[in-house]
Image (cartoon, rainbow, N blue to C red):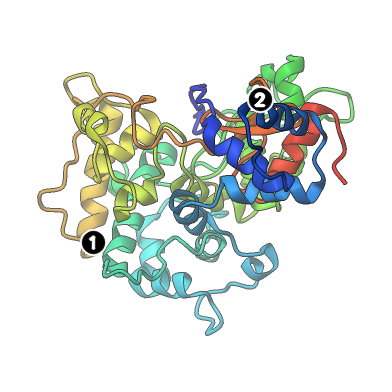
Amino acid sequence: MKIWHISRLATPLMAGLLGSVLLACGGNTPADNGSTLLAETTTQAAAVPTKAQAEATEAALTNNDFFHKVKASIRTLPNAAVDAVQPGLASNPINVKRVERLMPAAKWDFYFAVRDASYTYQRFLQAVAKFPGLCDDYTDGRNADTICRRSLATMFAHFGQETGDHNASLPVPQWRQGLKYLRELGCDETGPGCGYNAECADPVFNKVWTCGTNADGSFKKYFGRGAKQLSYNYNYGPFSQMMNNGDQSVLLKNPDLVASTWLNLASATFFFVYPQPPKPSMLHVIDGTWVPNAADKAAGAGNDFATTIMIINAECGAGTEKPAAQNRIDYYKQFAADLGLNITGEKLSCANMQRFTAASSASYNIYWEKNWNAGGENQCQLVSYQTPYSALIGGNYVKCVEANWNVKLK
């Protein structure tokens, strides 16, 4: 399944904001007349900035309430601290302790009775620990336990559809058959097919998300792995960046780590907390951080489970419920009931919901791209379509400038 196929909806950077940043970072004083100011700005734009100036530009362009909220929700714990998480430890992070209290190990075993052995309770706790914003405390009056219950019920319902056995003949009900599959059914490292790597032969795509190669020169396979069945190099790369301090190559070179380590469940928590413009993150849908605008409401989207179905696989808009969407709804009801979550009045159906568009309030500019505008030399700008340079990861502005303008900032 493609979980990260983001629409390429280019949005230009506001010229006024960029101009202000250029003046602030360059140390120039506004001139007495417009022609002198234009000449100074043009000269400044053409110059290669210092690394410090580029970092100041990055800081200025991401210093707003939106970036503060999103960065807080996707912040990560160092992998060494994640590796130390074990059930019952007093040293476990706050969000992990909340999950342990609301869903102890016995419930995990009950919920996922036919799971692959690699999906352990400890690995799920580690996947939660990696993203401290998931099941975290709230200081503004929102009920953290309720939000965590909704988050767990939502994730688990989608686990059931994405990786469930869907076997009505088993004594275990289908809502408890999730996490059956670790790797995409019928796929392995050495067998035929299942490459999901046609993009690797494209010089443009491969330059952006450079595919790993085997000893014989063939490309690595990027078939579905883990609880969200992460697929394709352009999904493995961004996930690798978040897991490895901005290094996209780790999972592109070793994609099976998404199946064989705690990343098999972290891929799911990553997807849950990360926005995909023009779609908001599931976490922000559930906890109310995302506020739908008139276009979102007209499309039928809101702060409800139905909207998470549109986010994950867009099984919506047919007028009647598609079977996959109905499965998700049925599973959500079961998990919510068992977790003690009251979902009375919550919108569950997405049968009449339309896709997110550029008009959505979630059409965020969160990627750095080469600034193609006049006077934009040696600069990058914010866009809403996916590039290798997420503005949610510090330091990527410098990388964008260096890669796109073939310069080395000092």
Residue 54 vs 215, above or below: the answer is below
The residue carrying pointer 2 sits among few (fewer than 14), some (14 to 19) or many (20 or more) residues within 10 Å by Cα, namely few
Disc 2 and disc 1 in contact, CB within 8 angstroms: no
> Which residue appears at 26% of the width and 36% of the height?
293
Q: Which mark is residue 57?
A: none
Left or right: 239 in relation to 65: right
Q: What residue is pinned by disc 1? A: 338
Q: For the image shown, how many numbered marks are present on the structure?
A: 2
Residue 88 vs 132, above or below: the answer is below
Q: Which mark is residue 35?
A: 2
List x then y, in percent, for residue 193: 66, 19
- Looking at the rendered image, the disc whose residue lies closer to the viewer, 2 or 1, is 2
Q: Is residue 168 visible?
A: no
First reached walking from the N terminus: tag 2 or tag 1: 2
Q: Amino acid at mark 2?
A: Ser
List x then y, in percent, for residue 6: 50, 27
Taking depth in this image into account, of 198 and 390 the one nearest to the observer is 390
Taking depth in this image into account, of 285 and 128 the one nearest to the observer is 285
Left or right: 251 in relation to 147: right
Q: Is residue 217 visible?
A: yes
Local secondary structure at mark 1: helix
